[in-house]
Image (spheres, rainbow, N blue to C red):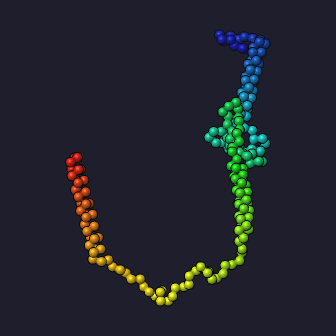
């Protein structure tokens, strides 16, 4: 039995049951739609890890992805139409290439040096102990001689004192001029 708005009893009809079932079906399909939408949203929330092949770490712009098989790193972001991953520059490969280049250059320089040494006729023999160009050791009398200290003459001292007096006078005059210039500007 069903009560209407006025409180009277009404007999239930099949149409009311159909409406209830229809509403229940609509609710179930709406709930199923929400679950499907949220699962697709979760699928777009992070890029695929391909059964553990990739390790993901969140960064400011998106996700940092490490390929655990090859060691290649990529940055992934969701700025365009879904997730896109871009390979990061491989500094290791650049360093290995530079090391290889330097090793080749080193080998070429060593070969060139060996070629120049053989062309110059360099021998591995030791030099004689006596050098023909070297002077003999000084005699004992010359080594005992002490250098004499020569003192300046009175004339040299007078010249030095006159120079210092003139320099001092010029310095004092310059200071007095600057003091007058500053006092005149104030």
**Residue 24 visible in rendering:** no
Looking at the image, which residue is at 68% across and 41% down?
75
Residue 109: percent from left, percent from top: 71, 60
Q: Quadrant of residue 20?
A: top right
Drawn side of residue 168 relative to residue 2, left or right:
left
- The tally of labels here is 0
* Relative to 25, residue 153 above or below: below
Q: Nearer the viewer, residue 25 or 45?
A: 45
Q: Nearer the viewer, residue 184 or 19?
A: 184
Looking at the image, which residue is at 62% across and 80% down?
131
Looking at the image, which residue is at 72% across and 70% down?
121
Drawn side of residue 80 relative to residue 174, left or right:
right
Q: Which quadrant is the N terminus positioned in? A: top right
Residue 105: percent from left, percent from top: 71, 57
Q: Quadrant of residue 106?
A: bottom right
**Residue 91 visible in rendering:** yes
Residue 147: percent from left, percent from top: 41, 83
Looking at the image, which residue is at 76% across and 21% down?
25
């Amino acid at each position: 039995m069903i009560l209407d708005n006025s409180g009277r009893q009404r007999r239930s009809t099949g149409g009311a049951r159909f409406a209830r079932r229809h509403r229940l079906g609509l609710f179930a399909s709406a709930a199923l739609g929400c679950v499907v939408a949220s699962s697709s949203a979760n699928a777009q929330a992070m890029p695929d890890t391909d059964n553990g092949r990739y390790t993901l770490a969140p960064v400011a712009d998106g996700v940092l992805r490490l390929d655990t098989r090859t060691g290649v790193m990529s940055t992934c972001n969701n700025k365009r139409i879904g997730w896109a991953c871009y390979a990061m520059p491989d500094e290791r490969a650049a360093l290995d290439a530079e090391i290889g280049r330097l090793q080749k250059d080193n080998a070429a320089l060593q070969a060139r040096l060996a070629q120049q040494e053989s062309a110059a006729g360099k021998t591995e023999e030791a030099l004689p102990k006596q050098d023909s160009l070297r002077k003999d050791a000084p005699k004992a009398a010359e080594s005992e001689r002490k250098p004499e200290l020569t003192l300046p003459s009175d004339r040299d001292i007078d010249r030095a004192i006159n120079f210092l007096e003139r320099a001092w006078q010029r310095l004092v005059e310059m200071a007095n001029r600057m003091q007058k210039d500053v006092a005149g500007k104030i």
